[in-house]
Image (spheres, rainbow, N blue to C red):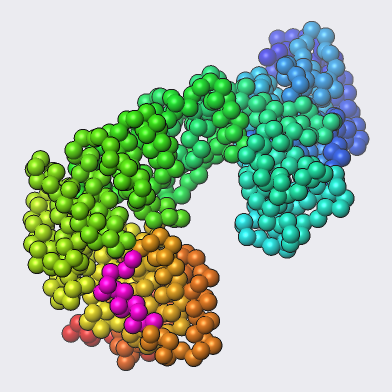
Amino acid sequence: MTATAACVTCGNPLPEAVAGRRYCSNACRQRAYRERSSAREDSPQDSALPAPLDTFVGRREELASLARLGADRLVSLVGPAGAGKTRLAVQHVSRRADQTWWAPLAPVSDAVQAIYTAVGAHPLPNRSVRDAVIAEIERHRRPLLVLDNCEHLLADVADVVSELLACCPRLRVLVTSREPLRLAGEQVFAVGELELPPGEADVTEALRYDAVVLFRDRAISVDRSFEVDATNVADVVAVCRALDGMPLAIELAARRITVLSPADVLARLGDRLALLTAGPRAAEDRHRTLRTAIGWSYDLLSEEEQAASRRLAVLGVPFDLGVASAVCGVPDALELLTGLEQKSLLVVDRAGGHTTFRQLESVRLYCYERAVAYAEFSLVADRVVEWVCSVVEPEISSFFPSPPVVLRLDRNVGLLDLAVTRTAQTGDWSRHALAIVATAWTSTPRGPRGAPTELLHQALSRPMPRAYRSVLAVLAAMHHRVRGGWHVTRRFAEESLAIERADARRPGTTARALEVLASAEAHTGHPELAWRLFDEAAALLREPDDKLARAILLNSYGWTLVQHGFADRAAPLVREAVTLTRLIGLPHMLNPVLHTAGAIALAHKNYTEAIDLFRESLEVGSEHPMDQYYDLEGLALGLVGAGSDDERALSLLVSASAVRTRYDFRAEPYWQALLDEARAVCRERITAGRLRAAESTGERMSLAQAISYALTAQPHAEDDGLVSARELHVATLVAEGLTNRQIGQRLGISPHTVARHVTQARSKLGLRSRAQLAVWAGRQAT
């Protein structure tokens, strides 16, 4: 830098004796003062500040947040193509009363020269362009420099901004870019999608959201007769959601309203890159079509980042770091993903302590086109197959896959169809079997766990290693078990067991085959044989320290005993299963065990305890809601037995029955008899008008709504004012001085559930405080 080597007013060289000063004389200092004073009194003169011709929609929270960043000297508005960074910057800057310069960098290749032109600097004798810029900036009291669209000049912009901020202490800089400058002190302000309404929003609700308002305003600008009404609101909302709330994409879609209805636009979004091309003539080239807007970002990537973007686009679903590493063919894709995220070409989602990545759908479709051009589909599919097999194969000889493996597959369940299809196309039947095993181990909130019947049967007709065939056969047996096909269940279980007995090397899969066969024998008229098979399976699992496998087996044994009238024999088995599952520390795995414990409580007519157990099972099983229809039924049976809320019970029974019908899940004869009896009791005790209302409520509810209904404001059976065994246990721990969180950790339930037990116990006992409950529990112990 040479800024301090010459007088900033006249440009004359400064002698070495005054090298640390800025002026060569008092005259120059006074002249600079007069110029600064004059600049303060003048009205601000913005340099080519864009003046948009259309309305600015939404971003109220963003504008308020930007206003609060007024003290920060470097703020970068960062977001993907078409997010509206420039429009937001214009709206924010237009509210300032200070000197503002706007430097549009998209069309230039020299950042310093563009800034020189924007600030209106004048040449100084024997001085650099940067020195001239600094001298001009220093004439103003609170200057703001806006650098718009600098992602293609990132290194140069970072260099000049760093220097300007160091030399001009009053300067503030606002940057718009698709990635940050990565300078010290930089405040990165993410500009993402507009707020989106829920899919079922009506007109009034939809028009509260910025995305819908933007669509409406831009559509009206080309067709004054357009309005969002009851006939098209669902399609308008669906278009905005399909476009990820990105302003540019929504604007381009809205301009098609002159010739297409919202429904037509929605139907054509699969080819959105061809559809969304009608930008205003005055717009920059890269904002006239969605393809060029995204292509601008793609072209700025390195070759490695472009390849990663193409290959990840083939997936079509969110993915984690492990999947990305496999698909990109690198040991660790962390740096690649970090780079793409910083360039606004990946979205990071964090939920439940886990991080996944996804591409906005418009970005994905662009990159997918590039992947097709590079013929990379087969490469990606093969790498997905390798990843799936690497996860499944180590677990293939287990009684039950480890929970982390199941969770990992659940989080990447969208990849499994690709693996199944690819292995079938290539005739790789061994890996095809592993891909189907992965499918059978997974579930989603929208569907049941397990592979489709046809897929399992077709796979079993193909050649494969015997160990894989054994696992597929037992999975087919389990598939038919939940559908009540006991004879088919037995046939597949016998096939698996025959393979396992011949090999005699895999106790886990042998025990699993024994367990499924035992339940089939019990339901086809051979209960004594069933008990022997269960005992044999339990003996195989006694040695390995696999608490989860033993808990699952004991629960299955206990559930089968209950169905055949042996609740007393089942009770100790299920108590051990509950203890083991709580020790493992996986609350969601408690769901089936608590259900069986609840069934035992029902058999003993302990309805209060049964209600507690089924409610807890509903709470801990939230990760896999498709497994919870059994708990809705159990809770309903408890309510009917206690006589506490027949209408709610009937609604839950109807809702659970709809799930069974939809997925062909047939109840065991024992359980079905209980359900039929409970319905009959409800019909006898509920008046005709209320009966139909309760049934209608159950028919209208989704499974998620039914679970919420079951757990909200639930009247509790009083059992003559006595607390349940669970409430007594909780009260005892309260007397020990434990908090709700500590009690929840000890019992494997949530603090919310503990609080509910405390409240219910106090209500039943007429106690006014937690301290009184602790005193009462202490007396019970003595």
Q: Closer to the camera, 686 or 69?
A: 686
Q: Residue at x 49, y 40 (%)?
A: 317
In the rendered structure, which segment of residues is drawn in magenta?
Answer: 666-679
Q: Is residue 457 in sight in this rendering?
A: yes
Q: Is residue 712 found left or right of 42 in the rendered image?
A: left
Q: Main secondary structure of the magenta part?
A: helix
Evaluate whether residue 29 shows in this view.
no
- Where does the image place residue 235, in percent across and percent down from the top left? 69, 53
Residue 129 at what x, y percent from top left?
77, 14
Quarter of the figure with the C terminus: bottom left
Q: In the rendered image of this protein, does residue 219 appear above or below residue 631?
A: above
In the displayed structure image, the side of residue 577 where residue 664 appears, left or right: right
Q: Quadrant of residue 468?
A: top left
Q: Nearer the viewer, residue 29 or 372?
A: 372
572 or 5: nearer the viewer: 572
Indicate left or right for 492 with 105 as reference.
left
Q: Residue at x 35, y 69 (%)?
A: 631
Rendering coords of residue 489 (x, y %): 23, 56
Q: Is residue 663 above or below residue 69?
A: below
Q: Residue at x 69, y 32 (%)?
A: 274
Relative placement, left or right, of 150 versus 94 is left
Q: Does residue 66 belong to the magenta stretch?
A: no
